[in-house]
Image (cartoon, rainbow, N blue to C red):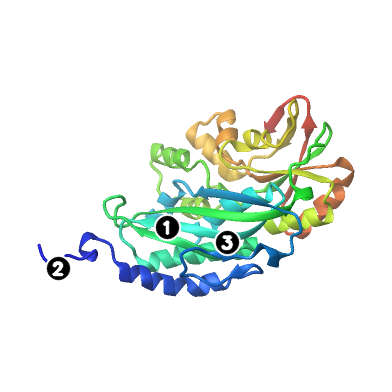
């Protein structure tokens, strides 16, 4: 065997270099204060001093998109899955009061198709713009034998900052505090193994109509809502009365809100289950408790606030185009009801 190249083994360095050139404009469009240089360095540089923080705490988050990727790949829809990736990371930063500063992605595939990768990364850049953070770098890995040629996987990493005195959750959460829900855009990026199991058990295709009127494929691929700008805007107006946020992902509403509540505090809340979740429950014969710990069930972010400030905070969030659900209050007993 003579003159064997890396390309013969399934890895095309030239395609990787071409992809970097194609995505540079997307990354440049996300630039913000603090970014130093552009794509292509060994490490991404960020000048925290340029952002104006005086006593900053750095907050970091990493996540993926899960088996929602299987649906995107099966349908050949690669343009929105990048927003899902960004959302899963930056929504976790803002719950601690942090402003997302920059984002990096990891794209791994069996065979690099630059057109597909470009669409995915363009979606990542769009998500970064929605979150106000910069796409400062990433990694593309071509791994034949690890993935099938038409498969790819995604992971993301984000860093944010918050002034020390503004770090959330606050320690003064108490009984009677109001619990708000910010509506989700749909299933977001959790529970898709169960979604796919339900569809297989009912012999359903992604072309079938969903209860919302869209096809199931269209409904399930709705990108995860990014709550960063609305949350930060409300925090700026009501810095003392917003006591906690909770991003509702794996573990559901109860499991995620418990992470920010003081010991002994519970939720006494109720809301209406949106059509897509009611359909999933009925089609899969899924118990309510299992729905609540698997899916967001229509609530993408929970906000815990002072009762006295509730009208103003609700108005501020609605101004930011959030659909606000008045769910209930913090209690000494747990009562979670969906109808």
Decide if residue 220 is on the left or right side of residue 337. Answer: left
Residue 83 lies, in percent from the top left, at: 54, 58
Tell me which label, 2 or 1, sits earlier in the chain: 2
Q: CA distance from mark 2 to mark 1?
A: 29 Å
The quadrant the C terminus occupies is: top right
Q: Which mark is residue 3?
A: 2
Q: Is residue 269 above or below residue 245?
A: above
Give the alpha-carbon distance from disc 3 to disc 2, as whole Å: 43 Å
Residue 127 marker: 3
Task: Examine the image and state in which quarter residue 55 appears.
Answer: bottom right
Residue at far left of view:
1
Tell which tag, 3 or 2, sits nearer the viewer.
Answer: 2
The span from disc 1 to disc 3 (Cα, nearest Å) is: 16 Å
Q: Which mark is residue 107?
A: 1
Q: Is residue 262 left or right of residue 277?
A: right
Q: Residue 58 placed where, x, y %?
A: 65, 52
Q: Nearer the viewer, residue 73 or 51?
A: 51
Up-down relation of residue 63 to residue 174 (above or below): below
Q: What residue do we see at 82% from left, 31% from top?
A: 175
Q: Nearer the viewer, mark 1 or mark 3?
A: 1
Lateral position of residue 97 relative to residue 189, left or right? right
Q: Earlier in the sequence, mark 1 or mark 3?
A: 1
Tell me the SS state at disc 1. Answer: strand
Please tell me which residue lies in front, 138 or 311.
138
Query: Can you tell which of label 2 and label 1 is closer to the viewer?
Result: 2
- At a point 30% along the width and 50% down the height, the residue shown is 146
The 10 Å Cα crowd at callout 2, few under 14, some 14 to 19, many 20 or more, is few
Q: Check the picture and name the quadrant holding the N terminus.
A: bottom left
Q: Is 42 situated above or below 275?
A: below
Tell me if mark 1 has few (under 14), some (14-19) or many (20+) residues whose alpha carbon lies within 10 angstroms of its own: some
Residue 136: x percent and y percent? Answer: 54, 65
Along the polypeptide, which appears first: circle 3 or circle 2? Answer: 2
């Amino acid at each position: 065997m003579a003159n064997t190249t890396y390309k013969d083994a399934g890895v095309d360095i030239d395609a990787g270099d071409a992809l970097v050139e194609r995505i540079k404009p997307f990354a440049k469009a996300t630039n913000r204060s603090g970014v130093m240089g552009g794509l292509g360095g060994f490490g991404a540089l960020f000048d925290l001093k340029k952002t104006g923080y005086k006593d900053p705490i750095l907050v970091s988050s990493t996540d993926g998109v899960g088996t929602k990727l299987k649906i995107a790949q099966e349908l050949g829809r690669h343009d929105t899955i990048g927003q899902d990736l960004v959302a899963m990371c930056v929504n976790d930063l803002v719950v601690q009061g942090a402003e997302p500063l920059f984002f990096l992605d990891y794209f791994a595939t069996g065979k690099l198709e630059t057109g597909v990768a470009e669409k995915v990364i363009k979606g990542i850049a769009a998500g970064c713009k929605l979150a106000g953070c910069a796409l400062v770098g990433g990694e593309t890995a071509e791994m034949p034998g690890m993935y099938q040629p038409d498969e790819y996987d995604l992971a993301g990493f984000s860093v944010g900052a918050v002034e020390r005195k503004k770090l959330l959750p606050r320690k003064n959460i108490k009984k009677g505090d109001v619990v708000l829900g910010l509506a989700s855009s749909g299933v977001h990026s959790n529970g898709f193994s169960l979604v796919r199991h339900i569809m297989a058990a009912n012999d359903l295709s992604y072309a079938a109509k969903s209860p919302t009127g869209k096809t199931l494929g269209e409904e399930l691929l709705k990108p995860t809502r990014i709550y960063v700008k609305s949350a930060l805007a409300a925090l700026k107006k009501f810095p003392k009365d917003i006591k906690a946020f909770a991003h509702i992902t794996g573990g559901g509403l109860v499991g995620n809100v418990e992470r920010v509540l003081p010991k002994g505090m519970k939720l006494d809340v109720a809301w209406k289950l949106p059509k897509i979740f009611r359909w999933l429950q009925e089609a899969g014969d899924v118990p309510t408790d299992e729905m609540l710990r698997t899916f967001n069930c229509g609530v993408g972010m929970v906000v815990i606030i002072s009762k006295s400030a509730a009208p103003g905070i609700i108005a501020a969030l609605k101004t930011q185009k959030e659909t606000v659900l008045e769910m209930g209050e913090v209690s000494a007993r747990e009562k979670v009801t969906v109808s």
